[in-house]
Image: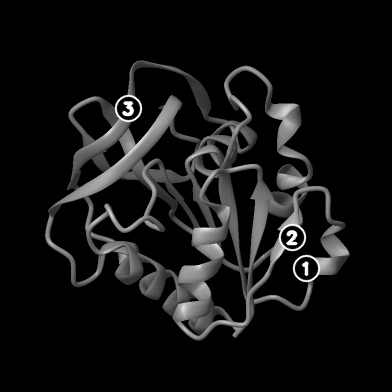
Amino acid sequence: MRVYVVDNGGQWTHREWRVLKYLGVDTKIVPNDSPVSDLKEVDGLVLSGGAPRVGIDPEKMGKNGEYLDAFRGPILGICAGHQFMATHLGGAAAPAKVPEFGKSVVKVHEPDVLFEGLPDRFEVWESHNDEVTKIPPGFTALASSPNCSVQAMRHRDRPLFGLQFHPEVEHTQFGPDIFRNFLKVCENST
């Protein structure tokens, strides 16, 4: 299985790559200005977190919009990738009322494939100034935290998933399990 990580300048992009590598995936990090044609042979994409403030300067997210429009396989957006997914597909992201940095507790409201086999509450690692303030049409909010109402979302028909928190860092409980669950979606979509 081949899953590429789109580099949006996130501080933990290499950790996303490393978790996928550890799980036995053929993976590499690609720039966010890579042509869509370079991604046609992959089974899934991870849109990394990043330095861009999606609610303020979404143009710094490169060709993420093209990937969301043209790539039909599963896509997992993390942090800025999650926020961009929401805004590009008709939702909204804006500066958070309470920016989150460090540990938080996520409550899963809608059990979904990403959280299969996990408890409905667990600790996660946050690092964001912005957040999704309106989910896009066709999406369902899956989880929240005390300061963020959309910690996770997914599209009801397409295999599109977004996470505000960072499953790639060791401070997030069950992070590798979340990636494993995403990989199951990738495997079943091929």
Tell which tag, 1 or 3, sits nearer the viewer. Answer: 3
Mark nearer the N terminus (2 vs 1): 2
Q: Amino acid at mark 1?
A: Leu
Q: Residues within 10 Å of mark 1 (few under 14, many from 20)?
A: some
Taking the image as shown, residue 9 lies to the left or right of residue 39, namely: left
Q: Is residue 138 visible?
A: yes
Q: Which residue is mark 1?
A: 39
Whole-number angstrom distance, CA of label 2 to CA of label 3: 27 Å
Q: Amino acid at mark 3?
A: Glu
- Between residues 169 and 54, which one lies in front from this camera angle? 169
Q: Which residue is mark 3?
A: 100
Task: Say above or below: 128 vs 47.
Answer: above
Residue shown at 55% from the left, 82% from the top: 25
Mark nearer the N terminus (1 vs 3): 1
Q: Amino acid at mark 2?
A: Val
Residue shown at 72% from the left, 43% from the top: 65
- Colouring rule applied to residues: one colour
Q: Secondary structure at mark 2?
A: strand
Whole-number angstrom distance, CA of label 2 to CA of label 1: 9 Å
Q: Position of residue 70 (x, y in %)?
A: 76, 57
Q: Position of residue 173 (x, y in %)?
A: 22, 58
Q: Residues within 10 Å of mark 2 (few under 14, many from 20)?
A: some
Tell which tag, 2 or 1, sits nearer the viewer. Answer: 2
> Where on the picture, by quarter, is residue 4?
bottom right
Asked whether the beta carbons under mark 2 and mark 1 sit within 8 Å of each other, the answer is yes
Mark nearer the N terminus (2 vs 3): 2
Q: Which residue is mark 2?
A: 30
Q: Secondary structure at mark 3?
A: strand
